[in-house]
Image (cartoon, rainbow, N blue to C red):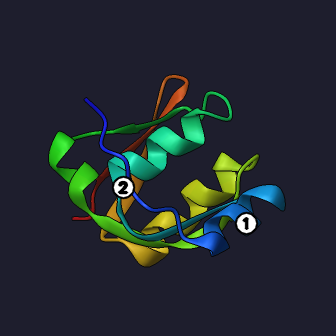
Amino acid sequence: MRREREVPPETVAAWRAGRLAFSDRPLAEVLAEFERYGPTGLKLARPDLGALRLSGSFASHDAAAFARILPRVLPVALRKRGGETLIDARK
């Protein structure tokens, strides 16, 4: 069952401008939101990484740019595997 929650007005404004805005959201939730706009090819290497918290505003249509930013703001590294990009813990 999905719980209802209040949506901050600034996230609605961001959505109308083609952006996704997050404030202290789990990475797994952020990735799921990007997937609503199309396949991203981004996968978590380990489920526990999905609990990392993220805030920011990102272009909803540019998952590749979002992926490039991730290692700058979270303790993760990106690895290519076939047609996917794995989000893994930084070593």
Residue placed most toward the observer, 29 or 84:
29
**Pointer 1 local density, CA inside 10 Å: few below 14, some 14–19, many at least 20:** some
Image quadrant of residue 83?
top right
Q: Residue furthest right?
A: 17
| Image coordinates for residue 21, horizontal then vertical, percent | 60, 66
Which residue shows up at 48% across the image and 64% down it?
70
Q: Measuring 21% from the left and 65% from the top, which residue is drawn there?
A: 91
Residue 82 at least partly seen: yes
Q: Secondary structure at mark 1?
A: helix
Name the amino acid type tagged 1.
Answer: Ala
Residue beneath disc 2: 27
The amino acid sitting under disc 2 is: Leu
Task: Report how far apart the C-alphas of labels 2 and 1 lie in the structure.
Answer: 18 Å
Q: Which residue is mark 1?
A: 14
Q: Is residue 72 left or right of residue 40?
A: left
The answer to whether residue 44 is left or right of residue 42 is left
The mark nearer the N terminus, 2 or 1, is: 1
**Looking at the picture, how far across and down is residue 8, in whole percent?**
54, 70
Whether residue 89 sits left or right of residue 58 in the image: it is left
